Image (cartoon, rainbow, N blue to C red):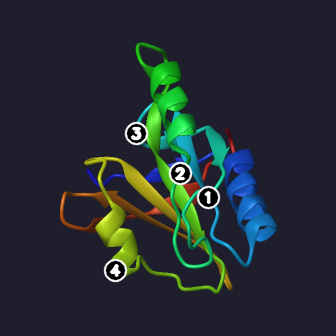
Amino acid sequence: MTKVLELAPRVAHEVFEHGLEAAPHECCGILIGPNEEQATEALRSENVHENPRTEYEIDPELLYEAVERTDGSAVEIVGFYHSHPRGYAAFSETDVGRGSWAGKTYLLASLAPLRFLGGVWNGEGFDEVPVRVDLEA
């Protein structure tokens, strides 16, 4: 069975809105949900990278808080998101170099045109994952 990432409508809206607000910088954040295929919450992070126009780094404090919050709870860290404000709708070499959470989905929000791209980190790169908005969530 092929993995699919389902986004609650408010998550899809939040990720694109965050990306548009952060432009021309990249935005980033954490996806939370009940299982690895459903994101029901997007936690916005400040992009703490020294070059936020072309790279991203999630605030380590927020990441720690997310791990603590989800440990032993009914929700988990589904994955992470970031934007490409200038519309590069593919994972860059930098994105591949930054991947580190095996089995987690990385969501890329391209802003021109508006498009989601999902990939599960396999230790060496991203295996593409279909992304859909769950209109019943």
Left or right for 18, reference 122 = right
Left or right for 16, reference 94 = right
Q: Amino acid at mark 3?
A: Glu
Q: Where does the C terminus fall, quadrant-wise?
A: top right
What residue would you read off at disc 3? Answer: 36
Mark count: 4
What residue would you read off at disc 1? Answer: 47
Residue 37 location in percent, x, y? 43, 43
Q: Are marks 2 and 1 in contact (CB under 8 Å)?
A: yes
Name the secondary structure under disc 1: loop
Sequence order check: which comes first, mark 4 or mark 2? 2
Q: Are marks 4 and 3 in contact (CB under 8 Å)?
A: no
The residue under the point 66% across, 52% down is 46
Q: Are marks 3 and 1 in contact (CB under 8 Å)?
A: no
Sequence order check: which comes first, mark 4 or mark 3? 3
> What's the distance in space between the residues labelled 2 and 1, CA to CA?
6 Å
Residue 58's label in the rendered image is 2
Sequence order check: which comes first, mark 3 or mark 1? 3
Residue 117 location in percent, x, y? 49, 70
Name the secondary structure under disc 3: loop
Marks 4 and 3: which is nearer the front? 4
> What's the distance in space between the residues labelled 4 and 1, CA to CA?
18 Å
Residue 122's label in the rendered image is none
Q: Amino acid at mark 1?
A: Asn
> What's the distance in space between the residues labelled 3 and 1, CA to CA?
24 Å
Q: Residues within 10 Å of mark 4 (few under 14, many from 20)?
A: few
Q: From where the camera sits, is residue 30 visible?
A: yes
What residue would you read off at disc 4? Answer: 93
Left or right for 2, reference 14 = left
Sequence order check: which comes first, mark 3 or mark 2? 3
